[in-house]
Amino acid sequence: MSKDGNMTIHLEVWQQEGPNEKGHFLKYSLEQVTPDMSFLEMMDVLNTKLIKEGKRPVEFDHDCREGICGTCSMVINGDPHGPQKATTTCQLHMRSFKDGDRVVIEPFRAKAFPVIRDLVVDRTSFDRIQQAGGYVSVNTGNAQDANNLPVRKQDADMAFNAAACIGCGACVAACKNASASLFTSAKIAHLALLPQGQPEREERALAMVAQMDSEAFGACTNTGACSAACPKEIPLEHISKMYREFATASSRKRDS
Amino acid sequence: MSVNFEDKIPSGPLESKWERARNDYSRVNPANKRKFDIIVVGTGLAGGSAAATLAELGYNVKSFCIQDSPRRAHSIAAQGGINAAKNYPNDGDSVYNLFYDTIKGGDYRSREANVYRLAQVANNIIDQCVAQGVPFAREYGGYLDNRSFGGAQVSRTFYARGQTGQQLLLGAYAAMNRQIAKGNIEMYSRREMLDLVTVDGVARGITVRNLNTGEIETHTGHAVLLCTGGYGNVFYLSTNAMGSNVTAAYRCHKKGAYFANPCYTQIHPTCIPVSGHYQSKLTLMSESLRNDGRIWVPKEVGDKRSPLDIPDSERDYYLERIYPSFGNLVPRDVASRQAKFRVDENRGVGKTGVAVYLDFSDAIKRMGEKAVSAKYGNLFQMYEKITGENPYKTPMRIFPAVHYTMGGLWVDYDLQSTIPGLHVLGEANFSDHGANRLGASALMQGLADGYFVIPYTLANYLANANLPEVSADQDEFKDSRAEVAAKLDKLLGVNGNKTVDEFHMELGLLAWDKIGMSRNEQGLKDVISKIGELRNEFWQNVKVPGEKNYKNSELEKAGRVADFLEMAEMMANDALTRNESCGGHFREEFQTPENEALRDDKNYCHVSAWEYGGNSEKPSFTLHKKKLDFEFVELKTRSYK
Amino acid sequence: MAKLNAGYFKSTVGQKQIVGLMGLLLCGFVFTHMLGNLIIFIGPEAYNMYAYKLVSNPLIYVAEAGLVAMFVGHIVLTIKLTIHNKKSRPQAYAVSASGEKKTTLVQKTMAHQGIIILVFLILHLITFKWGTVYTVEYDGLVVRDLFQLMVEKFNQPLYVVGYLGCLVILTMHLSHGFQSSFKSLGFNHPQYEPKIKCAGFAYAAFVGFGFISQPLYIFFFL
């Protein structure tokens, strides 16, 4: 480390022109990285240098930079959102790295998340899972008074924990099977825990699982890698809940 | 072309204006609704709720967002909560009180009738969101919990931990998803609106760029709803998302929509200070922190001791000193300005000297670390993640940052802009927050506009407007596509030496310095000429790498910064012509001896709506004034002493 | 009883549950198999008579058919799911995860372990079920002398090493499989999860230790 505490980081960043082109790693040793920089600010500095050198900057997804929108992705040295627990890439800071570190940055890799360019992937498969049933069918204006249905605090808190999912896709990126089970189960669990979610509870579980299966995600093998990588620490137990909900719904389904 | 510049406020008593309006509005027959294509740009709380609700009613909705999914709009980052006068805590709240606090909080620069309507529908919003499954905080009995927020003297804020915006947005997103699945909403994500298409002066479509492929597309519709948020990123550093921008609204402005009160910007007092030149954005921490944290600076100028070594007697708890009755809970503009004064007096703290302390040691002594952690744990964790400091041990360092913009496209009571057919919702319009927005009101306004206002007012527009068929092949649309493509080519063609971000940073520093927390005539005049120079340099020396037919973030940013370079000038003009201090607009020449804002109700109780002229390199702005009539509340000096 | 619809069996969730259910039943089989085999510590006669009573019971055919069905169900569906899972990430990461985000080796290689166990199972059946038939007579009853076959096999050092290797893999497979099956079947609750995990490890260790003790006993003491 230099005297001022700044570091040199040896970056290897995935670049891929388009969805159907082959990718490669761009190697770049970035100097003057300060520990207080966020990881994405380090990427900004990299891009400014690349532009100044007449090279193409790296495309990466990012937006709120405060860990809530779920836009940023990236797999950093094999870890979705980097090494820090419960932290999105945008909240990761360079003090998590040491001077001279080699940092390999890859996109989220999954068949259901095709690469658009460089580190930017297409996560619309997640939207389609939500569209299959991740809602309560209540038209605007239908609602009764908000306090008419009390909800046990424990259930409300659990529902909140499930609903805290930011839809970033780290669970898929981390899973050896690229399974979307944690993502799908979080929404099923959120609504199954609340009285408002009851009327459509079974249809929702059936439809969302069917959509998840049709999107080229793998199946769950309960390794827990998803939950460990989840920046919002969505617990693995929701997946079991999804299994339960799905089995119950299947057993009670009537054709017609 | 006809300019729609009448407030259209219904007559009658305040309480029944909205009801009267709804009774008088024309309606669209259910069978006819599906014949109308409604373009909704933006999928935040306003856009998401509007798209879902209109689709439920049977309209054909086309929804657009720049993000990869509608769920990622920046409403998601709102932390604190959403107000409603449910009066569940039985502490004397009412629709009138909510209305009054909001009008007063806005320093009497908002429209009475709009604010009253907002307070009225707020209760419906809570009902609707709970019905959607939004997991608001609850008490042990299972009923909804409320907290006091942002200086309110009643507990009327509903919240979902520190993620209220996220949960409300996911509710609206879910409602949209239901309609997308039914085919009532056609969703276009990763599309950036770059132009409004008008036919015979009426908004009939938009031109967008597909951000994945670079393709320029036009979409036709019978009405356009703009729900694209605020322009806080003029300042480069703000609490907005990196992608938040003014381009969609600004391009409408260029097409003739008046822009109202652009100088009203809100600076949020509790943000994490800047740490270095590479800083890309600022992170807000919920102002609920001010409920238990005490704000102070050292009494001694230039005291560089560690905060733990400064004894209580040598600390200045300046908000408690100046405002004994509100203390640390004064409104955002007041708290922010006082922090700036301390830094200007060279009493700022931390390495950079541009921060004040927010201290929890007394709260920890009083409630215990566990209770403090239960209340603020996630915020403390966030602070530690970003700064590497433990706020349980040393006081937090905070400094104000740009957070919200109260100004926006001018709209009438029906949310229609000066361009017929163009409706503007949420932060993108100007009407409800006046010169300053109170905490937990933004979520309320976005959802009020989308769920409960636009469904009625839009029907009235559609039922009465004469809307002949249009096609994307006709000249207006072709011209728009060509114009948009030419602008992109122009940006790519400059091929200079400075990056887009470098220009944006420079603009941000200029704006923060002169159009930020406090403004003066000379500074504003200087900054107008400096912005002009920077804009000229931009068009001669910007370097935009890459191609237009691929995902190209630099090209996206370049177009947005070009608009910010014009927007900033309009803001400065607006600030310069408003010779008073009110809410978020503080002119140094207009203050009381105690440094409080000095409003001039006689001469400035109006909305300043700006009309665009000129071109990208040399814009010009013409001021139109619209008087604000206060029939029901008496204009008073805000006092939080 | 309600009828499960076809969607259930087509879904990855349904298939995983069947794999888990079959797995748990097989866990039960492995457990009783191990317990039965512990009879070798009592002596040759006890062991051979136990084996004789087992195979002479007509219900053995039903039990065997059930076992075959469980194995086939477990294996076929796992193969199907594994192929599906492999396809869902066509391009592998250049660097693999570390720290808490890492998948353990045992979890990562469940399918590989399964293949080894399947091969082992077939060889095991060839050796002991369909292998050399020695006989012995107890009180005029001629029964198969499996004990002798075991002594013969488990005195070959290479055979023992291979056998032990397979048992270690089986133990690993059971240790993740046991708790994973519970999760697939919908049992996962913070209050019980650590206990199930513990039970899974205890079960796998007990079964593994029980099985491993047998060839070692024969190799060193007989």
Image: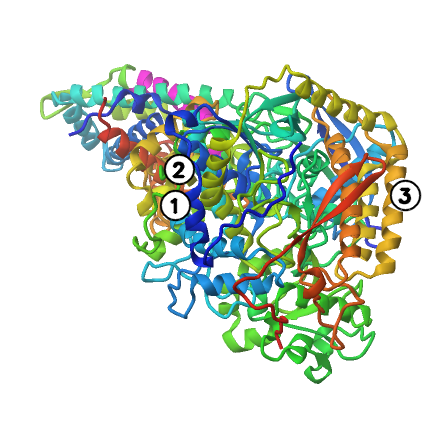
Provide the residue span drawn in magenta: C106-128
Residue name at image x 84 percent, y 47 percent: B506
Mark closer to the observer (3, 2): 3
User: Where is mark 3, residue-wise?
Assistant: B533
Q: Which mark is residue B36?
A: none
User: Considering only order in the chain, which callout, 3 or 1, is on the residue closer to the N terminus?
Assistant: 1
User: Where is mark 2, residue-wise?
Assistant: A135
Mark closer to the observer (1, 3): 3
The answer to whether residue C124 is magenta is: yes
Residue name at image x 73 percent, y 35 percent: B254
Answer yes or no: are tags 1 and 3 on the same subunit: yes
Task: Name the image quarter holding residue C73.
Answer: top left
What residue type is disc 2 on? Tyr
The residue closer to the viewer here, C80 or C109, is C80
Q: Is residue A234 visible?
A: no
Answer yes or no: are tags 3 and 2 on the same subunit: no
Task: Tell me the distance, in whole angstroms, between the alpha carbons under discs 2 and 1.
Answer: 8 Å
